[in-house]
Image: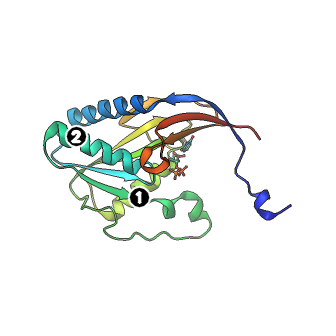
Amino acid sequence: MSEEAVVQKPKIREKGRLMSASEIERTLVRLAHEIVEKNNGGENLGLVGIKRRGVPIAQRLAAMIEKIEKHPIDTGVLDISFYRDDLSTSGVRPTVAPGTIGFDVTGRDIILIDDVLYTGRTIRAALDALFDHGRPKSVQLLALIDRGHRELPIEATYTGRSIPTSSREIIEVKLNEIDGQEQVLLVERVD
Ligand SMILES: O=P(O)(O)OC[C@H]1O[C@H](OP(=O)(O)OP(=O)(O)O)[C@H](O)[C@@H]1O
Ligand SMILES: O=c1cc[nH]c(=O)[nH]1
């Protein structure tokens, strides 16, 4: 057996579609209005998407908020792959590249944005990275899907859908900008 065969991805079975393209769109419209309401119009807001699928979600929300409030919204990117907990145990010491978010976060009301909130480890790492870049006035968290199973005391300020899951299940968010399709699927590992 080749080595590639040993490290195959787990087999998965599709269990159903949780959100269609129009449901994702409607949910993002609602979240954009919630953000505007909670932040009094959002003059001081900055949206930071976590790679990968948090980025197009942040860009879409910024466009919606700009349309509602008629002022520009700073939008940036956090690539947290080098900040993961599991890397630190292997001795890798993450370094922060200055300016990679795309705007100065100091003094701003930052909304961190990701597609799925699960254990919370990605968000913890993203918070570390964010504060390496500057000192925001406040940080709020938005997740399109909260699937539970938190391992850290982290909760979303804005949630698209809360979907209770088993640990064998996986939420797959598909977005046009990355996947060429638009839906949220529930799948299950079968091996
Ligand atoms: O709360 P957590 O347990 O950290 O899980 C949530 C993270 O997992 C997914 O990223 P993934 O590592 O699968 O990468 P991807 O976004 O590139 O698919 C998802 O996009 C979140 O960033
Ligand atoms: O189910 C999950 C868990 C983490 N990240 C995902 O994208 N889906």
Residue 147 seen from this side? no
Question: Which quadrant of the structure image shows residue 35?
Answer: top left
- Estimate how packed mark 1 is, as few (under 14), some (14 to 19) or many (20 or more) residues with alpha carbons within 10 Å: some
Picture quadrant of ligand 2: top right
Point 76% across, 61% down: residue: 4
- Of residues 69 and 107, the one nearer the viewer is 69
Q: Quadrant of the C terminus?
A: top right
In the drawing, what numbered circle is on residue 65? 2
Residue most toward the right?
A: 1
Residue at x-position 33% and y-position 70%: 98
Which residue corresponds to mark 1?
128
Going by the numbered disc 2, the residue's amino acid type is: Ile
Position of 97 relative to 135 (above/below): below
Q: Secondary structure at mark 1?
A: helix
Q: Nearer the viewer, mark 1 or mark 2?
A: 2
Residue 136, by quadrant, is bottom left
Instruction: Tell me the kind of residue under disc 1.
Output: Asp
